[in-house]
Image: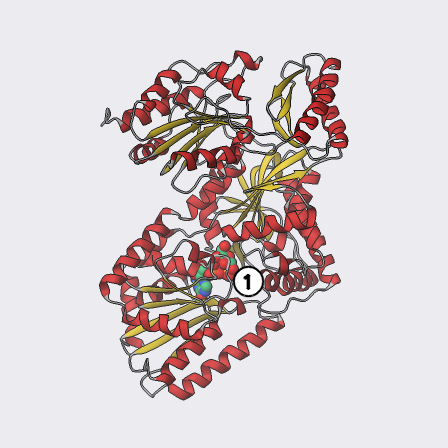
């Protein structure tokens, strides 16, 4: 990101409903702002400081104008909300329409046209505030369901911005989403972003499905092609899961403090030192399954499987959305259930449920987590559930049992918890008893694995991976980064390894004439060194036609080849696999005629024939000529051959009669080689299709700048060759 920005503007702008500060006014009128210690602030604070960032949001006080100010080194830009805005946009549309709808309609959503109008108006206000402080080319990261229209509003006002959106709550299946009268407007709003982040794979999938059903835009894996103009242009939008996390080290550190451990002991003592302390910590919300938990606990006491002499349940229900009627009713319902249960089962010396309807300081929460033998997370639907992760992060003693609903996003990662379906009361009861009775060894084994997960993917890793996918815009330094080098060591050790490489821009620098492209010095030797090692296969994955790839790359005979974005495949035999239908051959003829005519009329453009399509190269044309040729090609072909696949590369526009991507090519190669792990390197947008099919264990390497799904990045083909040499050396044991 550029370091300098015009005065009053910022290169990174975060937009969320609430600013991360609380307003306090002393009786004498002095105003102070206290940083509210949310996970998001912790995640973004260092970045905000180092990259000249600002945070746009509502300061928590209605009907008041505040000038932008600085707090704890972060620039804060307050957005004004009136009492009516809060009622209609926040409590109404956000929390009484979107919240229940997105949480699988656990409570019935209300649909009111007036609250929708307020939602649009307030989103516009947030967008305007962000536009006002965003430097040219700035990155703007919008958060959560209250602001889903903001990405599109930003793009319309400022096409120069890089726009990200993260949805903290689930995205519902189409059958539910479709109920929303404004379903198209919301999707359209979100699709203004370059990257749309979700908590779970399933959420991103639901979103892509809604886009297909409502707009018919093509989606491939995590990539959505969104038409961006009249002339058939499209933008690539990435919709992918980025599971959020917590500052695990900070929780661990707090838990190790002697005063907090003393407090944990005190809590147990105050509760009469029960054999087992169970804990629930939630905002008082109907999505959290507090009622189900209480019901299961009550039945266990009634059945005599647990007794109040041995087990106490502490339930923290922090106050939330108290002016929304569903929440008022929920509070009555929960408190009635707690009262009944305590009336039935508590004794003078033992309380069955110790219930608390307040908020506690973080230190007290940590002490409670430490004191609890069993943590109950029984959400009926939850984006992630950070409480589950906090419990794990606190347990430095590697003890304690987490009972976790499979309907919380955290269940995708925390597989060593006891996973439950909270709707199944009998199953939940069995899980609770199992947690109480779990032997120490099993507790330790599970908790160790849970702790590893949470420590590895902490909130800093979360925000870094989101921003990496979003921007990737910073200048890339020369050499192999340290973290990549560390990962190469483990990659080099796997039994069956597939090294798949794009050619142009990855092994060979881009050149004016495609036939002149050659791999950088040392590449051939590096590839040979890899080919000489047992268990290693090397493949080239190119957009070029195979004949052209063979001509420029001159690969060794044991290199596997795929060309034309996976349409042509050559695997250990001289034959090239490719089948075209007669209708596809006819389409090819028309394509050749149209592009031939355009190329003849715009100087500097050339047409390359490919097995299943043609490419129009504009690298040597003037900028205007290139644009004209590409526009004419799109216009004429969208009329004459509407079903064609169009792909845009650097100064090249490709049309194919058969749709295939480098992702398809890579899948085929993975299957064929039976590789345990895959290394893929590429530089172009078309390589994103390959990165998108990589698994957690695989390694993606992007060459150069630009948004990417790859985890690592190097500057140029020279570094790629260095990486290949390094893998070969590590695998052959020629290095320490
Ligand atoms: C939304 C999504 C997603 C609670 N009571 C007290 C207190 N807390 C803290 C917890 C935790 C946070 O509040 C709650 O986070 P959750 O993730 O559990 O749930 P939501 O509030 O519904 O959050 C959720 C999250 O966004 C992030 O993306 O995980 O799925 O619904 O950190 O510790 N903290 C203190 N006192 C309390 O009394 N100090």
Display colour scheme: secondary structure
Task: Give the residue at x 62% y 48%.
Answer: 67
Name the residue located 41 percent from the left edge and 81 percent from the top edge: 298
The answer to whether residue 496 of the structure is visible from this angle is: yes
- Please indicate whether residue 517 sits to the left or right of residue 123 in the image: left
x, y (%) of residue 636? 76, 27
> Considering the image in quadrants, where does the C terminus appear?
top left
Residue under the image location 60 percent in, 22 percent down: 610
Q: Is residue 181 above or below residue 591?
A: below
Q: Residue furthest front?
A: 582
Quarter of image, res 399: bottom left
- On screen, residue 140 versus residue 441, left or right, reads right
Where residue 387 sits in the image (x, y, percent)? 42, 61
Q: Which residue is mark 1?
A: 28
Which of these two is toward me, 321 or 717? Answer: 717
281 in relation to 294, above or below: above
For residue 115, above or below residue 520: below
Task: Name the spot of residue 536 as percent of width and height, x first.
Answer: 33, 29
How many labels sit on residues? 1
Residue 3 appears in view? no
Q: Secondary structure at mark 1?
A: loop
Alpha-carbon neighbours of circle 1 within 10 Å: few (<14), some, or many (≥20)?
few
- Cβ(mark 1) to ligand 1 < 8 Å? no
Residue 535: image location, x then y, percent: 31, 31
Q: Is residue 252 above or below residue 51?
A: below
**Of residues 573 and 524, the one drawn nearer to the viewer in this rendering:** 573
Q: Nearer the viewer, residue 262 or 109?
A: 109
Q: Residue at x 70, y 51 (%)?
A: 184
């Amino acid at each position: 990101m550029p370091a300098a920005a015009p005065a009053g503007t910022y290169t990174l702008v975060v937009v969320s409903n609430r600013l991360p500060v609380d307003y306090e006014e002393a009786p004498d009128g002095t105003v102070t702002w206290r940083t509210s210690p949310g996970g998001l602030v912790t995640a973004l604070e260092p970045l905000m400081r180092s990259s000249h960032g600002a945070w746009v949001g509502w300061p928590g006080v209605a009907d008041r104008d505040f000038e932008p100010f600085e707090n704890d080194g972060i620039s804060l830009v307050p957005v004004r909300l009136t009492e009516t805005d809060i009622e209609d946009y926040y409590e109404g549309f956000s929390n009484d329409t979107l919240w229940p709808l997105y949480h699988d309609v656990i409570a019935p959503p209300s649909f009111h046209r007036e609250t929708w109008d307020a939602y649009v108006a307030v989103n516009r206000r947030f967008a305007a505030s962000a536009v006002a402080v965003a430097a040219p080319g700035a990155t703007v990261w919008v958060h959560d369901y209250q602001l889903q229209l903001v990405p599109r509003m930003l793009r319309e006002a400022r096409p120069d911005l890089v726009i990200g959106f993260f949805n903290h709550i689930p995205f519902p299946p189409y059958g539910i989403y479709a109920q929303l009268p404004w379903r198209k407007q919301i999707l359209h709003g979100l699709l203004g972003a370059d990257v749309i982040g979700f908590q779970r794979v399933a959420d991103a999938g639901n979103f892509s499905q809604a886009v297909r059903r409502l707009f018919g835009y093509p989606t491939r894996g995590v990539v959505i092609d969104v038409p961006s103009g009249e002339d058939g242009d499209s933008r690539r939008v990435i919709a992918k899961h980025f599971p959020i996390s917590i500052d695990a080290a900070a929780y661990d550190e707090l838990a190790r403090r002697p005063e907090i451990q003393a407090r944990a002991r005190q809590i147990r003592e105050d509760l009469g030192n029960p054999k087992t302390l169970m804990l629930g910590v939630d905002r008082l919300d109907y999505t959290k399954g507090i009622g189900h938990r209480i019901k299961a606990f009550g039945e266990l006491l009634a059945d005599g499987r647990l007794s109040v002499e041995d087990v106490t349940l502490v339930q923290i229900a922090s106050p939330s959305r108290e002016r929304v009627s569903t929440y008022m009713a929920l509070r009555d319902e929960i408190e009635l259930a707690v009262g009944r249960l305590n009336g039935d089962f508590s004794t003078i010396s033992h309380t069955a449920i110790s219930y608390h309807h307040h908020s506690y300081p973080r230190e007290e929460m940590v002490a409670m987590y430490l004191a609890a033998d069993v943590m109950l997370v029984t959400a009926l639907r939850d984006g992630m559930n950070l409480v589950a992760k906090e419990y794990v992060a606190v347990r430095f003693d590697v003890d304690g049992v987490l009972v976790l609903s499979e309907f919380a996003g955290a269940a995708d990662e925390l597989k060593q918890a006891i996973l439950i379906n909270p709707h199944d009361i009998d199953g939940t009861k069995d899980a609770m008893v199992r947690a109480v009775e779990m032997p120490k060894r099993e507790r330790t084994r599970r908790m160790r694995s849970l702790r590893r997960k949470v420590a590895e993917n902490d909130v800093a890793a979360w925000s870094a991976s989101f921003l990496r996918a979003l921007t990737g815009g910073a200048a890339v330094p020369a050499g192999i980064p340290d973290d990549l080098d560390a990962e190469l060591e483990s990659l080099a050790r796997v039994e069956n390894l597939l090294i798949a490489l794009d050619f142009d821009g990855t092994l060979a620098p881009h050149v004016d004439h495609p036939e002149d492209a050659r791999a950088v010095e040392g590449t051939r030797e590096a590839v040979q060194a890899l080919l000489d090692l047992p268990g290693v296969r090397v493949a080239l994955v190119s957009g070029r036609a195979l004949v052209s790839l063979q001509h420029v790359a001159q690969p060794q005979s044991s290199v596997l080849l795929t060309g034309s974005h996976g349409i042509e495949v050559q695997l250990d035999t001289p034959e090239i696999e490719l089948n075209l239908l007669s209708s596809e051959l006819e389409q090819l003829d028309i394509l050749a005629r149209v592009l031939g005519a355009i190329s003849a009329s715009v100087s500097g453009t050339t047409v390359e024939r490919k097995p299943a399509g043609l490419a129009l190269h504009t690298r040597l044309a003037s900028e205007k000529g290139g644009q004209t040729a590409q526009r004419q090609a799109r216009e004429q072909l969208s009329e004459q051959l509407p079903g064609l696949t169009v792909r845009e590369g650097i100064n090249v526009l490709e049309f194919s009669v058969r749709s295939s991507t480098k992702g398809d090519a890579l899948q085929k190669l993975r299957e064929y080689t039976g590789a345990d792990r895959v290394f893929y390197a590429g530089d172009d947008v078309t390589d994103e299709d390959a990165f998108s099919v990589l698994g957690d264990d695989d390694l993606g390497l992007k060459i150069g700048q630009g948004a990417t799904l790859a985890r690592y990045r190097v500057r140029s083909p020279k570094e790629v060759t260095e990486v290949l040499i390094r893998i070969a050396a590590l695998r052959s044991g020629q290095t320490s």
